[in-house]
Amino acid sequence: MRFEAKKAAAKRGTKNAKSSKRSGRKAAPSEPLFSLTADQWLDIVGAVLIAVAIITLLSALSPGGQGAIMGAWFNFLRTAFGWMAFAAPVVLAAFGYYLIQHHFDNLPRIGLGRVFGLLALFFSLLMGLHVLGMLGGQPDGARLAAESGGGGSTGWALLRLFIAALGQVGAIFATLALIALSLLMATGLTFAHLVDAARRIAQRQPGRASVGSPASRETITPSWDTPRRPAKPAAGDAAPDLVINGLKTRRGKEGREPKVKVPLAPEPAPPRARASAQGGDADLPPARVIGTGRAAPKIPVGATPAVGAAAPSTTPPPLSSRYDSARVWELPAITGLLEQGKDATLQESDIRKKAAVIEDTLRSFGVPGRVTEVNRGPTITQFGVEPGFTELKNGKQQKVKVSRIAGLADDLALALSAPRIRIEAPVPGRAIVGIEVPNGETSLVSLRDILESEDFETLARKTRLRLALGADVSGHPVVADLTAMPHLLIAGTTGSGKSVCVNGIIAALLMYNAPDTLRFLMVDPKRVELTGYNGIPHLISPVVVDVEKVIGVLKWVTSEMDNRYRTFARHGCRNVLDFNAKAEEGRLAAAAAGTPVDPDFKQLPYIVVVIDELADLMMLAPDETEKMICRLAQMARATGIHLIIATQRPSVDVVTGLIKANFPARIAFTVATAVDSRVIIDQPGADKLLGRGDMLVMTPESALPMRAQGCFVGDKEINKIVRHWRAQGGGGEEDPVTPTLEAPEAPVAVAAGVFSPPPPVGGPLSWDEARALSTAITDVGKGGNGSNADRLFEDAVETVRLQGKASISLLQRRLRIGYTRAARLIEEMEEKGIVGPSVPGSQFREVLGGGPKFNA
């Protein structure tokens, strides 16, 4: 019994095992008969359409050799669509090729509006063909349709309805209008786009397009279903696939993409900005002539805008000359002085390939995103990525965090084989994350490109102090108003483009300002960057290269600021523009009445103080330098005095918090570390720049820095500008002009190293007096009193008498002065016979006696 029970149990277990195996086989999913992807299906459909198109074309070309099927097919096309049947092979082949070239995910998403427009365009073209057939020799529309001509039976049926309702003439005009309207619906364009395109074609001149012109932004030809500007999709339409420099284009596989020129150089300047052909130096082009005589128009005080505020739509007239009231200055001509930039070649397939790499890399790290916009600039290309959605465990979708995309900068750089990548997350005012990738071929943005741009010309209506900085990531010009900044801080390492930027700013100001409207004070401790400007009439004094003199320069500028404020207070003016307008009005009123002119009524020019290296000043006298720079930055704006300071070392001991707080406008070039980047622009990013003009610009209006490529101005161009102004100032190239030193009308008091300008009797310090006081500026920096005697001379004599020996280092330690001043004191004591000459091999000099202390 037990044996039979075990046998029955074993039999039942075998049956259960077999049934479980059968049930397992049934649960396994069956493999599909054809395992083809969506892209493969598209390739098959496209190949079939191309084959049908070829057979249809052969049937049309050889009517006698048609088979039964193809003959019936082509006869149907001829009967239904008339002459349009011959376009069927082209349409079928093009559609089949389009399917083969596009992935399934990248097929165009066309809304109902576009579909309706395409259908209306097709039927309206059939009607138009039938109208052409009737006008071409067969007035009977029914017979034309029976002969398979015109638009066939379909075109005649529609046209007959229009003729019955509107008559023959009305039907013709209605057909033309329907073709135009359906074309606009199918392409998404408007009449404004057509009018704008016609105007650009009519006004296009031979040459290169301007940086800010629409032509420079149209780097990719818009597709048939795309408007020129990226706009919000209409209801039923999907978002555009890709926007390249403001133009929507369709995605596709790698194919025959045309190379497109990206013009960065501008069109020739308009006639009013170009110089007329005149004789002169063969190397110098004709110049623009401006007069600064007594014929200046009257400017009401109430019409003068405040500094940095919006100005009237007309360009302000030239200020009367305070440098020389009867002088006529010739402004440099852009043509011939400045060179144009270099075009770059753009391959659309390269952009699409990089966009695909970015999307695949993000997807591989679980961060889905889609490149929807591409902005190609001179140096970098910004890919705008729209973050996608991730699916949570509960089935809900969550938007990808921006920080996750920003954290993949190194991985994206590796995937794109790029040296370094900067991610702007998010782009200000946009719903995208900007991934900035260096271009394989960079474009040269020249100073002339920016000066001839439309944006720079527009800025002339607001201010005289226009700055040409460069071009942004889309190729648009970056210009600024120095009076609105009102001071500028520039930082960058060696070779980053900082000095070129400073020279570009100075050159742009010299191109549009005569010495009676703008004056410069330049400080160049390195003696190589700004010394080339010596001799131009815009300089108040020669370029200061001795660091010890800079403190005196800043003190003089502070005194000039205080004098201007006192003058403004006497005449009830708020800023330099109000005062100049009132002075011009008072001068004209006095001339009309025949009365003497108020001595205060002299036009005040702008003063731009350029300091090429702030670190040297902070090392010499940090407290005094910081104090005077901050005071000028806080108060000098209304008086027309502006600071442009550059430094190679933006550390916290050079760019202090107080200095940075008073310079809201800053430009950061390549810096060494992210810490230095935070010092200059309050965030990292400058350490990832590419150098050679790649910069981040922060203005008072923008909360975040904007990336741009600085404009380039070469030494040859700067020399031409300097030669132009030197020729008018009376100096030559090898012998720069040094301002003539004349005795001021009032005595200059210098006590305890502080320069006090003459008391403002009748007005602030004039520029003739300022030039006469250039020696006083030097003596203030040295600690002198404007004469050969040093106020520490007696202390120095007492020191060497008590020590019984004399040396430069001894005076440096005892009197706490610099090497230059101590050496000058030693030389003066040697001349007076107090100390002996230097002895070779000995550090000290012999004390001989003499002088007031010794004879006492």
Image (tube, grey):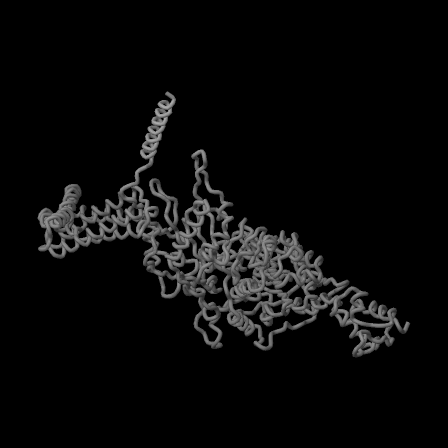
Q: Residue sitting at 71 percent across and 68 percent down? A: 776
Q: Residue at the top extreme?
A: 1
User: How many marks do you count on the picture?
Assistant: 0
Between 759 and 841, the residue placed more toward the observer is: 841
Q: With respect to residue 546, does 82 lie above or below?
A: above
Drawn side of residue 339 relative to residue 551, left or right: left
Drawn side of residue 775 relative to residue 474, left or right: right
- Expressed as whole percent of the image width and height from the top left, the position of residue 103 reads 33, 49
Where residue 63 sits, quadrant-wise, is bottom left
Can residue 28 be seen here? The reply is: yes
- Expressed as whole percent of the image width and height from the top left, the position of residue 668 reads 56, 57
Q: With respect to residue 331, does 100 lie above or below?
A: above
Where residue 815 sits, quadrant-wise, is bottom right
Between 711 and 39, the residue placed more toward the observer is: 39
- Expressed as whole percent of the image width and height from the top left, the position of residue 192 reads 34, 50
Quadrant of the frame with the N terminus: top left
Between 455 and 58, the residue placed more toward the observer is: 58
- Expressed as whole percent of the image width and height from the top left, the position of residue 707 reads 50, 55
Quadrant of the frame with the C terminus: bottom right
Q: Residue at the right extreme?
A: 856
Can residue 320 be seen here? The reply is: no
Drawn side of residue 324 relative to residue 137, left or right: right
